[in-house]
Image: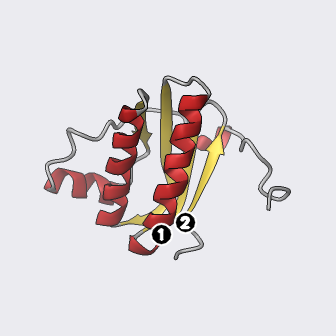
């Protein structure tokens, strides 16, 4: 497991991914992301955003993770957009003919302006 790969729920239905999206991290992140998406549905959200601006590196496991979350979101009636997709994931998606499938937003202000929903220092 890669402890540096994290998901941080932010304001406004946004989830920030930070760290390395590789085979070691994806199983845990998949479960956490599914729970976040289900919570968004329960809150009555109709759309959510996953911000990848904190991703340091990603491989095909990261691409599979994004596709799985897309399926979960659609099953729950959510519109899901990815922003700040790393170039490595863009290339993998293009080579795999999946670039048209991934809902990548062309512009979104960086997550740096958004605040975490919980204080990570007090929620342990």
What residue lies at 44% left-to-right and 75% top-to-bottom?
24
Q: Which mark is residue 57?
A: none
Q: Where does residue 33 sit, x and y in percent of width and height?
A: 51, 50
Discs 2, 1 touching: Cβ within 8 Å: yes
**Mark 2 or mark 1, whichever is nearer to me:** 1
Q: Where does residue 94 sit, x and y in percent of width and height?
A: 18, 51
Looking at the figure, which quarter contains the C terminus?
bottom right
Local packing at callout 1 (Cα closer than 10 Å; few below 14, some 14-19, many 20+) is: some
- The secondary element bearing badge 1 is classed as helix
Can residue 83 be seen by looking at this rendering?
A: yes
Can residue 110 be seen by looking at this rendering?
A: no
Determine the residue located farthest toward the right in the rendered image. Answer: 122
Give the colouring mode of the picture: secondary structure
Name the residue carrying label 2: 5
Q: Where does residue 58 sit, x and y in percent of width and height?
A: 38, 64
What residue lies at 59% left-to-right and 37% top-to-bottom?
39
What residue lies at 72% left-to-right and 41% top-to-bottom?
115
Location of residue 57 by image quarter: bottom left
Q: Is residue 99 left or right of residue 22?
A: left
Location of residue 91 by image quarter: bottom left
Q: Is residue 40 left or right of residue 57?
A: right
Precedes in sequence: disc 2 or disc 1:
2
Mark 2 and mark 1: Cα distance apart in space: 6 Å
What residue lies at 23% left-to-right and 58% top-to-bottom?
92
Q: Nearer the viewer, residue 95 or 107?
A: 95
Question: Is the residue 25 above or below the residue 11 in the image?
Answer: below
- The secondary element bearing badge 2 is classed as loop
Location of residue 105 by image quarter: top left
Question: Is the residue 87 above or below the residue 99 in the image?
Answer: below
Q: Nearer the viewer, residue 39 or 20?
A: 39
Name the residue carrying label 1: 25
Q: Where does residue 73 sit, x and y in percent of width and height?
A: 41, 36
């Amino acid at each position: 497991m890669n402890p540096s790969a994290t998901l941080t729920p932010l304001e406004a239905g946004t989830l920030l991914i930070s760290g390395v999206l590789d085979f070691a991290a994806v199983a845990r992140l998949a479960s956490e992301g599914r729970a976040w998406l289900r919570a968004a549905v329960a809150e009555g959200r109709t759309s959510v955003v996953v911000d990848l601006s904190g991703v340091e590196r990603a491989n095909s496991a990261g691409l599979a993770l994004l596709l799985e979350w897309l399926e979960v979101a659609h099953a729950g009636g959510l519109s899901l957009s990815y922003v700040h997709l790393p170039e490595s994931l863009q290339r993998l998606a293009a080579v795999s003919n999946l670039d048209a499938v991934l809902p990548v937003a062309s512009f979104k202000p960086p997550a740096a302006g958004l605040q975490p929903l919980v204080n990570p220092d007090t929620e342990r």
